Image (tube, grey):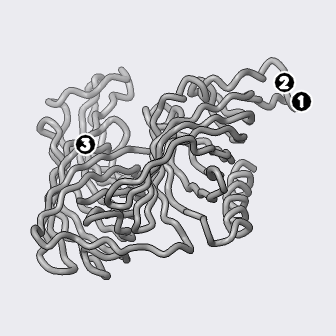
Amino acid sequence: MKRVQFIFLCLFFLAAGSRAGAEGVAYGGYFSFKGAGLTMDKTMEHGFIAITVNTDFSGVINGGELYPGYRGSAIYNQVFARGVTDCGVTASAYAGMGIFYGYLRNHDRHFGHSAGLSGDVGVMFDFPAGVRFGLGMTCDMGLNVRMGSRGIDNSLSKWYCNGVQRAWYPELRVLYKIGEPHIQSVRSKRSRMTFGVEWGIALPFVYICHRDFMVGEGYRVSDDGTYWHIHANGEILGHIGYDLSERLNLAVYAGYSGICKDFRVIPVSARATYCMAGTSGNGPLAFVDYGVGLNSGKDVNIGKLGFGYRFGVQGGTHVDFLLVGRLSGSCPDIIDPDTRLPVPTERIFRNIQTVGSVGLSMSITL
């Protein structure tokens, strides 16, 4: 039932875009510590309507819960200040009010149906290449209603506290405007060096384990098998690279990444990226990435394969939306089934775990 409701929200998002028409509409992604999803802007005379459908990471991003919630909102934002730079970038400040609905956790615990008013404030930057960056904050004010055995239980109906307590979390929206003439971004001829940052979410789903250890009671345990389990992890990376040709870039990446529950590493890797429309153009791209994850003597190998699309923003700056497949090793602590404590290193004879995951990332490259 909850999946049906989330699909309905996505269909509402698509229907709103089709009814709005192509002119003055921008589509893109929504990224925050609160969640991630899709967003759409429809330009109006004195502002814009922002429609967002996203997952909710309450209780998930800290590893306490397994499944995210979902949320949808429609907000009319009034632009109260606007300016244009010498290079053609339009900067605007906005604020507005609208409505939201979702199946969300309250206090990072139990799910409930949440609905009410949603307030928005922030700034946005429109680039001549057709890309819009928005940075803001949203406050959801409403009720969180849990269903009892006999329907709605008044004792389970409370204020949606997470909507106010997490209002200060920053939200980044990156959109591409449809139906408007765009100026192609061209990289400066002075340098082939590239710099940037990438962040995203990864969902490990398959674990291949080979473990052999001695428990506190004195007997030996061997555990070999394949397990299926989903757990959300985040990743943030910085990179420096060089354009070897018009379409090929080679870069070194490093940052901080979660491999699986309770196992995090500092990844260092080399990545080759092939841009089908050129490193300075708008178009599809593919990459292969291989390196090592550093973790206090528990170093692991990490391999990635990804596909995406590149949008030029301004003066050689680009935004990439990426779908990433990752295969990596991990060495999480082994928990003694008798004492429920980590097994000491001297009692572990083998602890090898291969983790397969998929994820979504966004990268900004200069």
Q: Which mark is residue 150?
A: 1
Up-down relation of residue 260 to residue 141 (above or below): below
Q: Residues within 10 Å of mark 2 (few under 14, many from 20)?
A: few
Q: Position of residue 7 (x, y in %)?
A: 69, 58
Dot 2 or dot 3, earlier in sequence: 2
Q: Position of residue 65 (x, y in %)?
A: 52, 35
Name the quadrant containing residue 331. Answer: top left
Q: Is residue 241 left or right of residue 234?
A: left
Q: Nearer the viewer, mark 1 or mark 2?
A: 2
Q: Position of residue 264 (x, y in %)?
A: 27, 39
- For the point 54% across and 52% down, which residue is it? 37
Circles 2 and 3 in contact, beta carbons < 8 Å: no
Query: What is the quadrant of the C terminus in the image?
Result: bottom left
Q: Circle 3 — which element? A: strand
- Towards the viewer: 224 or 15: 15
Q: Is residue 363 visible?
A: yes
- For the point 68% across and 28% down, which residue is it? 141
Q: Nearer the viewer, mark 2 or mark 3?
A: 3
Name the quadrant containing residue 315. Answer: bottom left
Q: Residues within 10 Å of mark 1 (few under 14, many from 20)?
A: few
Dot 3 or dot 1, earlier in sequence: 1
Per the image, the residue denoted by label 2 is 153
Q: Amino acid at mark 2?
A: Asp
Q: Circle 1 — which element? A: loop
Circles 3 and 1 in contact, beta carbons < 8 Å: no
**In 3D space, how far apart are the residues under numbered discs 3 and 1 (Cα atoms)?**
47 Å
Circles 1 and 2 in contact, beta carbons < 8 Å: yes
Q: Residues within 10 Å of mark 3 (few under 14, many from 20)?
A: some
Per the image, the residue denoted by label 3 is 256
Q: Is residue 31 visible?
A: no
Q: Amino acid at mark 3?
A: Tyr
